[in-house]
Image (spheres, rainbow, N blue to C red):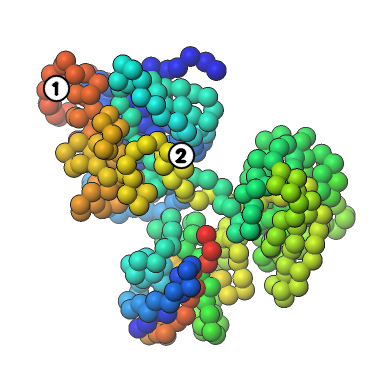
Amino acid sequence: MSAAIETDVAIIGAGPIGLFAVFELGLLDLKCHLIDILDRAGGQCTELYPEKPIYDIPGLPIVTGQELVNRLLEQVKPFNPQFHFGEMATRLEKLEDGRWKLATDAGTEIIAGVVVIAAGAGSFMPKRPPVPGIEAFENAGDGVGVHYAVRKMETFRGKNILIAGGGDSALDWVINLAPLAKSLTLVHHRDGFRAAAHSVNQMRELEAAGKVKFHVASVKAIHGEPGKMTGVTLAGHDKSEWQQDADAFLPFFGLTIKLGPIAEFGINLHENLIPVDTARFESQTPGIFAIGDINTYAGKLKLILSGFHEAALMAQAAFHVCRPNEKLRFQYTTSSSNLQKKLGVS
Amino acid sequence: MKIIATDRNGKVHELEGRDGWSVMEILRDGGLDIAAECGGACACATCHVYVNDGWFEKLPAPSEAEIDMLDMALAVEPNSRLSCQVICSDETDGIKVTVAPE
């Protein structure tokens, strides 16, 4: 593990509100590191609706989720934010000097005076099929049990593999794993696929060649001991059920949002939201701020524009936490040559 | 116009539909636990419901985009729909839906 990174502010979540926080903090000379479980900036805007027009951003009568994120990235560029993509913030501890140490599942450690949680509804995580006891077969080891992603294809060599789903991930892995599996079965709820046509064609060829079995079916039960999966019960739409050997089960139903490890940070939560005051947008743990969809207060509206406002006020409060001995002078970007210099426009 | 909705605990709710609103919006407004993460853009499959008692057949057929997006839903049945794509009207008065498992 490399040495911990020291910065002013650690932001959890690189969605629109986390990005705008970089801007507001940057105007006050506070440097930011951002952590996001996704592999790029934008959060729900780019993950769920990149092409969907948004009509209620002040000054932008119509803008898509992707365009808004692109513009925010351009806006924060002068402040050189450091992104840690594909990482989940998993642990938060207070240091003796009053600062915070935030750790991720990838081993990154960030020491910061202030932590800003701008995590929306939480982390994007793979959808877990409603199969009783499925949790017990997760994290069972390489190539066996339930996996929501393929990290090393080799670990699945010689295994009986069951894949569920009809999107691009499901079919890509059918095509890639079929040559090295002992057997590969695909189950999906219909005889049709969302995946790209050329992937579907390849899958059909593998099926015709006897290398892949396809059933219109769903997984009803997993058999074996926790950590040692032996097979599954499949069910068709006609309710017929049958059993099949399987060493590994790979469900690919995309992502859903779960609060995740933030719930374990020791911050006071109300119905999975972080209560904050509306002057500072600070949680009930001093030094931990929460902005955007993740917070709650009287009159809260889950709107991007509200999150922008929250980011601006949070930044003022965060400055005093990070720089207790300095005076904060409020300035406008329209008139302050100091701010314009930071923005690289004067 | 009514929507008869069964939540994940099996409790039945009688909700007042609104012309032109999606069933998802009525369920959410009625306090039922439905994620609807994408806010109604047919982009996440987390507003999945089963349409019961012959109502599935009475509805306009799902679009290709909805059928594709249902591939990302869990526990899909022949009467599955994404509730953000089912629009309330006089024709849907009394529709019966059950929120699908998470």
Q: In this view, does B26 lie above or below A102?
A: below
Q: How crowded is mark 1: few (under 14 residues within 10 Å), some or many (20 or more)?
A: few
Task: Kindly identify the residue that appears in the image at 65 percent across and 48 percent down.
Answer: A136
**Depth check, front residue: A17 or B11:** B11
Label 1 element class = loop
Q: How many marks?
A: 2
Instruction: State which chain disc 1 sits on.
Output: A
Instruction: State which chain disc 2 sits on.
Output: A
Q: Where's residue A245, x and y in %?
A: 82, 54
- N-terminal of the pair, mark 2 or mark 1, is 2
List the residue tagged with mark 1: A328
Task: Kindly identify the residue that appears in the image at 35 percent across and 52 percent down.
Answer: A271
Q: Residues within 10 Å of mark 2 (few under 14, many from 20)?
A: some
Q: Is residue A38 above or below residue B56?
A: above
Q: Which kind of residue does numbered mark 2 sit on?
A: Pro
Give the numbered dot on residue A45.
none
Please indicate, yes or no, whether residue A204 appears anywhere in the rendered image: no
Q: Where's residue A154, x and y in %?
A: 78, 35
Quadrant where the image shows the N terminus of chain A: top right
The part of the image, by quadrant, that contains residue B29 is: bottom left
Task: Kindly identify the residue that appears in the image at 27 percent across and 29 percent down.
Answer: A287
**Depth check, front residue: A182 or A107:** A107
Q: In this view, does A133 lie above or below A141?
A: below
List the residue tagged with mark 2: A261
Quadrant where the image shows the C terminus of chain A: top left
Label 2 element class = helix
**Depth check, front residue: A114 or A224:** A224
Q: Which kind of residue does numbered mark 1 sit on?
A: Leu
Q: In this view, does B83 lie above or below A272?
A: below
Q: In this view, does A169 lie to the left or right of A124?
A: right
Task: Kindly identify the residue that appears in the image at 50 percent across and 32 percent down.
Answer: A87
